[in-house]
Amino acid sequence: MTHFRGFDFSSANANANAFSQGFGPDGFGASAANAQAQSFQSGGPLGSFGASAANAASQGFNVGPGGLSGSASFGGSQTYNFPGDRDLSISYSNGFAVGEDGMPTYSGGHALSWS
């Protein structure tokens, strides 16, 4: 936290990644994922303001005797903290998958709140 004549500020960040792959007699496949988060908060004589965000994404596929299958998704959220204890929150998600039969499926949603 930084403090200077009645003002202060703090922040944080994080990031993570993963990856895997495989090969075998029944086929091959791979997957990957990423997640991130950030936040900050500041304050002064007129009040404080802050924000935070987090998100994640993943994908994977497999090729085998039955064909190709796979999926991918992502989602996240954001929150904004305003003076007077007011908050705005946003969240979202999306995804899709394809089975060995070739039929895709989709999903998703979002939300917004003010308190």
Image (tube, rainbow, N blue to C red):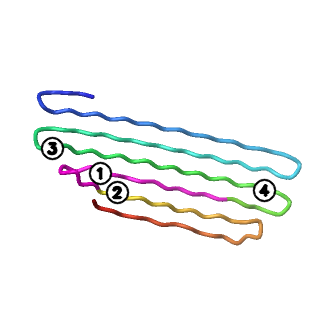
In the displayed structure, does residue 14 sit left or right of residue 85? right
**Mark 4: amino acid:** Val
Q: Position of residue 46 (x, y in %)?
A: 11, 43
Kindly identify the amino acid type of the residue bearing the numbered disc 2: Ser
Q: Determine the residue positioned at 43% across, 42% down.
A: 37
Mark sitting earlier along the chain (3/1): 3
| Residue 32 belongs to magenta span | no
For mark 1, what is the residue? 80
Residue contact between numbered discs 1 and 2, judged by CB atoms under 8 Å: yes
Q: Is residue 62 left or right of residue 3?
A: right
Pointer 4 with pointer 2, Cβ within 8 A: no
Label 4, label 2: how many angstroms apart (C-alpha)?
39 Å
Q: Position of residue 104 (x, y in %)?
A: 66, 70
Q: Amino acid at mark 1?
A: Tyr
Which residue is at 40% across, 36% downward?
13
Q: Nearer the viewer, residue 65 or 12?
A: 12
The residues tagged by marks 4 and 1 sit, at their Cα atoms, a distance apart of 43 Å
Nearer the observer, disc 4 or disc 1?
1
Mark 3 highlights which residue?
A: 47
Query: Which residues, given as a range, are shown in magenta?
Result: 71-87
| Quadrant including the C terminus | bottom left
Residue with the mark numbered 2: 89
